[in-house]
Image (spheres, grey):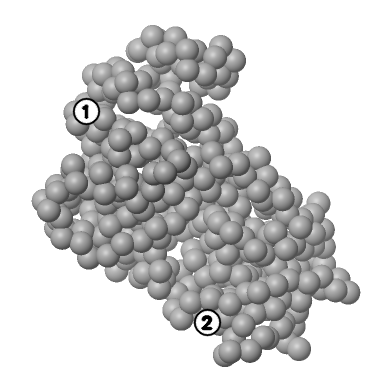
Amino acid sequence: MERYDAVVVGGGPAGSMAARRLAEGGAKTLLLEKRSEFGQVVQCAEGISHQSLTLYFKADPRFIASTINSARFYAPDGRFFTIHKERVGYVLERKIFDRYVAQTAAEAGAELLIKANFTRLKRQNGLWRIFFIYGGKEEVVEARLVIGADGPGSSVGKQAGLKLDIGPEDYHYALEYFMVHPAVEDGRIDFFVGDWCCWKGYGWSFPKGGHYGNVGVGVAIPPKGVSPRQYLENFVSRYFKGAKMLGFTSSVVPVGGHRLRIYSDAIMVVGDAARLAEPISGGGIPAALVSGSVAGEVGAKALAEGDLSAKRLKEYHDRFWKIMNRGEYELAYEIRRAFLKMNDQDLIYLFERLSPLFDGKEIDEIDAFKWARYIFTRSPDLLLFAARKMGSAFVDYLKRTVGL
């Protein structure tokens, strides 16, 4: 039976980054990917900020479909405002990007195995036994450390005993078309709200060159009898009527990882497996890259030291939240909770107060605390609005958090 220092399950950005860092740290590493190639299936709007991408990679034209310089925000009634920032972010070609991240893991020395479908995990004599289907039969390897990068379901984490369950309010369905339509404009991302099209979520248009792009919706669990797909069709029929469809994809987006323990003895979970997507946007690429990188670095050091205890691996948790700013994540999570209680009239009210503050403006940086202070100091009636929707305790939290 082949033995490794570490096995990583899942070859998305989180898993590939983890495998890369483990290998760079001298660990004998195996990366298992269930599909026939890395980057084969992309269930993502593919957006990432300049800051998040360049934390680990150069903005390479090979995997950048569009450079974003502005963002447009639509109210439920169709009115919009626009903000600007040069090179605020990018829309990636995830198939190319994911393959590139896996390439860096291979070049660092990790062993990669495609069409290897993880089935189960067993702890025995201080080692993990990792079972997977490969070539039509069950194979098994041993490892001192396992990292689960196997997405929202996270069989790895659950089988290892991690409590990763979250409530239904912490999931959104994400449904998306790849399409060509004149309303998709290169260099600008668009965001839409309205319960009629994006039930307790939002819609988006992310360009990928010319008038081609990713157009989709993220919706909470809809009312009984309504399909999430119906919201996507409502959205497209209003804003992108007559679009030429090139493809369709769907997935679920889990959040709320700040309330979970995402590590234990000889086990860590990363990316969507750890429910680390940004609570408002649902963006998961930055958290995937950071969590994978940090878990791999911590894992390599812990392996070298011979200490894979939960106490030692807690460094992963602490370093991840320092980089990602736990306070900002928690603020976003609480705002998300408030957003889920709003109806279209509430959203129009918000739009009417935010539009004069932002329309046509150049933003200097993306900072949730700074934006919140700016909004509430210039439109203090929004605090009264927040109190009506969420109660005085929520307003007190906002004041403390953003320094009002």
Q: Nearer the viewer, residue 143 or 192?
A: 192
Q: Please, which residue is most extreme toward the front here?
A: 225
Q: Nearer the viewer, residue 51 or 210?
A: 210
Which mark's residue is nearer the viewer, 2 or 1?
Answer: 1
Q: Quadrant of the rendered structure where residue 257 is? A: top right
Q: Is residue 159 left or right of residue 394?
A: right
Q: Quadrant of the rendered structure where residue 61 is? A: bottom left
Q: CA distance from mark 2 to mark 1?
A: 47 Å
Q: Is residue 320 above or below residue 36?
A: above
Residue at which label 2 appears = 115
Q: Quadrant of the N terminus?
A: bottom right
Amino acid type of the residue that numbered disc 2 sits on in the rendered structure: Lys
**Identity of the residue drawn at 54% across and 75% down:** 33
**Identity of the residue drawn at 65% across and 63% down:** 155
On residue 283, the disc is none
Q: In terms of sequence position, does the residue under pointer 2 or pointer 1 come before the other?
A: 1
Q: Residues within 10 Å of mark 2 (few under 14, many from 20)?
A: some
Query: Residue 274, percent across and down?
Result: 61, 52
Query: Residue 378, percent across and down?
Result: 35, 13
Q: Nearer the viewer, residue 200 or 350?
A: 200
Is residue 89 in view from this perspective? Answer: no
**For numbered disc 2, what is the local secondary structure?**
loop
Residue at which label 1 appears = 77
Q: Is residue 325 above or below residue 309?
A: above
Whether tag 2 and tag 1 are in contact, CB under 8 A, the answer is no
Query: Residue 285, percent across and down?
Result: 45, 54
Amino acid type of the residue that numbered disc 1 sits on in the rendered structure: Asp
**Identity of the residue drawn at 66% across and 74% down:** 119
Q: Residues within 10 Å of mark 1 (few under 14, many from 20)?
A: few
